[in-house]
Amino acid sequence: MNEKALIDDEHFEHTLRSEHTEIISPENIVYEKPGTLLDVDMHYCPGCGHGVVHRLLAEVIDEMEIQSEVIGVAPVGCSVLAYNYLNIDMSEAAHGRASAAATGIKRVLPEKYVFSYQGDGDLAAIGTGETIHTCNRGENILIIFINNGIYGMTGGQMAPTTLEGMKSTTSPFGRNVSTMGAPLKITELVAQLPGTQYVTRQSVHKPGNVRKAKKAIQKGFELQKQGGGTCFVEIVSNCPSNWKMTPIESNHWLEDNMLPFYPLGDIKTPNGRK
Amino acid sequence: MAKVKGDIIIDIEKCKGCELCIEACSQGSLERSRQVNNKGYLYIVKVQDNCTGCTNCALVCPEGGITVYRKTVDGKKQIAKIDNVNQDMNIEVNE
Ligand SMILES: Cc1ncc(C[n+]2csc(CCOP(=O)(O)OP(=O)(O)O)c2C)c(N)n1
Ligand code: SF4
Ligand code: SF4
Ligand code: SF4
Ligand SMILES: [Mg+2]
C-alpha cells in the first residue's frame, strides 16, 4: 500500500467540515449518473474502461430520449453481462455473433435503434466473419468495439489486436509478428467496405477523450436513424488486470503504446473519407 | 470575473478505489481514504475545498459514482455553459 496516498487525520477532518456544502443542492448538479445506467454494482475490475463506455451509452440514450427504442446485443467477453447494467432491451449473442444477431433484430424491427457491444476477441477473432459481412452488407446498426488488445475475460490470452511485442498468457515472450501475425486493424479494414458510413476510433482514458467518445456514440445512433449503412465506433480501452498494471499505469501505457498504433479520430465519415 | 465553486458527492460504496479520478483532478481535490468500503476498497474522498465542478473526475469514473455540483458564487458575469458533449471546459476561476 502506498502510504503517501493515504490522507492524514487533518485532511480527513477537513473533508467532514467542508465549508461549501451549500453548493450541494439539486439545482447545481452539472453531472450525475444517467438513469439508463442501472444503480447496481458492475463486476468489472477497478479502473476498467468497460464501465465508462456503459455510462456513455446510457448518457447518449437518455439525452436522445430513446430508452424504449433501443435494443442492444451483448457479446461474450467481460461485457457479457452488459444487459444487467443498462436499463434497455438487450439480447445476448453467441461469441462473435453479436453483429449477426443485431442484423436480425434490426431487419425485423427497423424502427428501433440497434447496437452491438463487442470486445476485440469477440469482434476481431471468433467473430471476424460476422463483423466483416455485417459491415459489407451495410446493416443499419451501430457496432461498439472495445479494443483492449487482449482476451480479458478468459485470463489475458493474445487477441488479434495484441500489439507487437506485447506479453500475454499465450505470447509470454511478447507477440512475435513473424509467427503470430501482425496486430489487426479491423477498424481500418471495415472502413474500406462500401457498407460502412461512419467509422471512428476513440478512447476513454482522459476526460477530453471521454467527451469525444460520447459524441461519436451519439453520432452513431443519429446516423442510424437516417439509414445509410453501418456505424462502427472503436474505443481503445484498458485491461489493468491482464496488462498487470494499476488503472493509472494502464491508461499511461495505453497512451504510449496503443495510441501510436491505433491512432484516434474519424476514419470514415458520411461526407467523405477523413 | 465570476467565481466558480464546485463540490462533488462520491458514492463510496460504488467506488473501487481505481484512483482515476485523483489523476483526472487538476485541483488535487481528491485523495484515497484511510478506510475501506463494504467491498474492501480504499474509497476516495475530497480533501480540499478547491473543487471547481469541472466534472473531470466524474467523466473518468468507471462506476458512475460521482455527482458534480457547480455554482457561480459571487460573480456578475455568467460562465460559459458547459456542454459535456461538444466542447472542452471553459471555466474561469478567480481566487
Ligand atoms: C465459442 C467460444 N469460444 C471461446 C470462448 C471463450 N471466451 C470467452 S470470452 C473470450 C474472449 C473475450 O475477449 P474480448 O472479446 O476481447 O473481451 P474482453 O473480455 O477483453 O472485454 C473467449 C475466447 C467462448 N465463450 N465461446
Ligand atoms: S479483465 Fe480486463 S477487460 Fe475484463 S473487467 Fe477486468 S480489466 Fe476489464
Ligand atoms: S469536479 Fe473537477 S475539480 Fe472537482 S473534484 Fe472533480 S475533477 Fe476535481
Ligand atoms: S474513479 Fe470512481 S471508482 Fe475510481 S477511485 Fe474515483 S470514485 Fe472510485
Ligand atoms: Mg478484449
Image (cartoon, coloured by chain):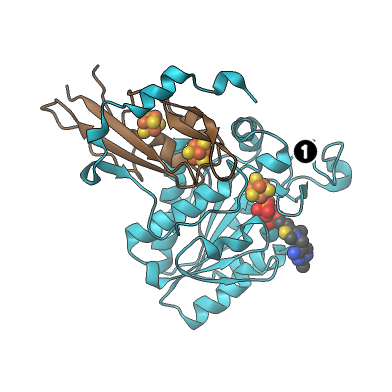
Chain colours: A cyan, B brown
Q: What residue appears at the point 10 percent right and 27 percent down from the top-left corner?
A: B76
Instruction: Using the image, determine if residue A6 lies above or below residue B58.
Output: above
In the rendered image, the residue lying farthest to the left is B76
Instruction: Say above or below: B64 vs A194.
Output: above
State the residue position of label 1. Answer: A164
Q: Position of residue B37 (x, y in %)?
A: 53, 41
The N terminus of chain A - image quarter: top right
Report which quarter residue A74 is drawn in: bottom right
* Residue A142 location (% of width, % of height): 51, 63
* Percent of width and height locating residue A205: 53, 38
Residue A239 shown left or right of residue B91 in the figure: right
Q: Residues within 10 Å of mark 1 (few under 14, many from 20)?
A: some
Residue drawn where x is 39% and y is 56% of the image: A60
Q: Is B74 on the left-hand or right-hand side of A207? A: left
Which sits in the foreground, A261 or A46?
Answer: A46
Rendered image quadrant of residue A100 = bottom right
Read off the chain for label 1. A
Using the image as rendered, state which of residue A210 and residue A221 is in the foreground: A210
For residue A145, side relative to residue B88 (left or right): right
Q: Position of residue A47 (x, y in %)?
A: 58, 41
Front in this rendered view, residue B91 or B17: B17
Q: Nearer the viewer, residue A99 or A188?
A: A99
Decide: is A61 above or below A53: below
| Outermost residue, bottom side | A108
Amino acid at the residue labelled 1: Glu
